[in-house]
Amino acid sequence: MTVTQTHLEARVAVRVPRDGPEDLAGSAARRLEALGAVERADVIGLCGLEPGLSATVVRVEARLAVGDEPATVLARLREAPDVEGVEPAAAETD
């Protein structure tokens, strides 16, 4: 079975450690890609920051390249330990 790559636009809140790089949006994208549910994450915009003692929650709007069905990817992201929230914006198949 061949899986078509899908691009899913979503607002995602990702926890980024305070000792990480200063590029918070880039760090959020790399953390999303490291989870395995997302093949590539391109940040469209920074929506907010919530500083904490050990980590900052970075809220971004991102275009996610995924190999699974969008609903499956969203479910996996919601269960990921570093993801505080996921809100789909739109999906399109390329």
Image (cartoon, rainbow, N blue to C red):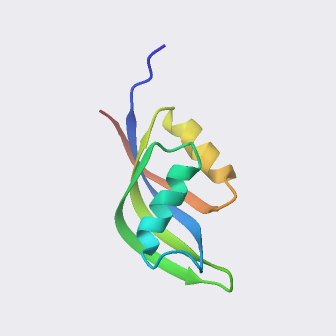
Instruction: Determine which quarter of the picture holds residue 62.
Output: bottom left
x, y percent for residue 11: 46, 60
Q: How many marks?
A: 0
Residue at 46% of width from left, 42% of height from top? 39
Is 62 situated left or right of 53 in this image?
Answer: left
The residue at 48%/75% (across/down) is 21
Give the percent coordinates (x, y) of residue 85.
Answer: 59, 61
Residue farthest toward the top in the current orientation of the protein:
1
**Residue found 64% across the figure and 84% down from its top:** 52
Tell me: residue 81, above or below residue 54. Answer: above
Say left or right for 90 vs 73: left
Above or below, comparing residue 80 to residue 14 in the picture:
above
Residue 13 placement: quadrant: bottom right
Residue 18, compared with residue 84, is above or below; it is below
Relative to 26, 72 lies left or right: right
Q: Viewer-proximal residue, 10 or 4?
A: 4
Q: Which part of the image, by quadrant, shows the C terminus?
A: top left
Residue 60, percent across and down?
Answer: 44, 66
Q: Residue at x 50, y 32 (%)?
A: 69
Identify the image quadrant of residue 81: bottom right
Nearest the eye: 56 or 47: 56
45, above or below 30, in the image: below
Q: Position of residue 28 (x, y in %)?
A: 49, 64
